[in-house]
Amino acid sequence: MKHAIVLPQEDFILRPWQEGDEEALSKYANNYKIWINVRDHFPHPYTLKDAKLWVRIANADHSTINLAVEVEGKSVGGVGLVFKQDIYARSAEIGYWLGEPFWNRGIISRAVDMLSEYVFNHPDYDICRIYAGIFEYNAASGRVLEKAGFHLEARLEKNITKEGKTVDELIYARLKD
């Protein structure tokens, strides 16, 4: 089910992570403002060693899609899907991040939309629902999802903990037309 996905736009490209991405990845991912809004398995500080490991493993798991967001020839962010299993087999969870210098350009909203459309319309994927869980304090991520056609589906009270603070998780979903 793995494909060499390349989705170009005028100002960015979504493509598989590749050797040579490590330096830019470690530069842009090493940001507290990003880390505070993602799961703890995303390292902080984000080192060159972390970037090398990610580039090596990002494309190895067939239950995921992990794509680099390339702007001006550099990998400055990422967007990915985890395909669920068992009774959840027609759902996928999306995650994303973007280097701070590239915020407020609409890049990540379009990347989330592009990947969602790709998976909904590709014959090898039988997905009818894509969802994301975000921290209640991350209004910017909520706007990203809404611009990409997602709607707020649920609030899970006191569901996630970051830096010792337990907060609500907001679940956004997008359904295949």
Image: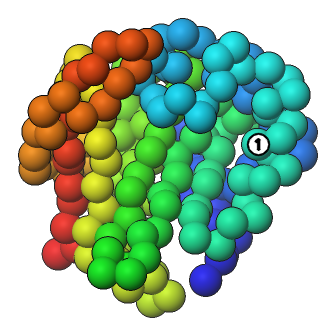
**Residue under the point 45% across and 89% down:** 123
Question: Which residue is identified by label 1?
Answer: 54
Where is 45 relative to 171, above or below?
A: above
Where is 27 relative to 11, above or below?
A: above
Q: Locate residue 14 relative to residue 119 in the image: left or right.
A: right
The answer to whether residue 171 is seen in the rendering is yes
Check disc 1 and give the amino acid type.
Trp
**Residue under the point 29% across and 55% down:** 131
Give the quadrant of residue 89. Answer: bottom left
Q: Where is residue 150 in the image (x, y as percent from the top left)?
A: 20, 50
Label 1: state its secondary structure. Answer: helix
Where is 43 relative to 163, above or below?
A: below
Q: Where is residue 175 in the image (x, y as percent from the top left)?
A: 19, 67
Where is 133 relative to 30, above or below?
A: below
**Residue under the point 24% across and 34% down:** 159
Q: Locate residue 65 relative to residue 133 in the image: left or right.
A: right
Give the quadrant of residue 177. Answer: bottom left
Q: Locate residue 127 relative to residue 147 in the image: left or right.
A: right
Q: Where is residue 45 in the image (x, y as percent from the top left)?
A: 69, 14
Q: Residues within 10 Å of mark 1 (few under 14, many from 20)?
A: some
Q: Quadrant of the N terminus?
A: bottom right
Pick whichever, 76 or 72, lies toward us.
76
Q: Where is residue 43 in the image (x, y as percent from the top left)?
A: 65, 25
Give the quadrant of residue 88. Answer: bottom left
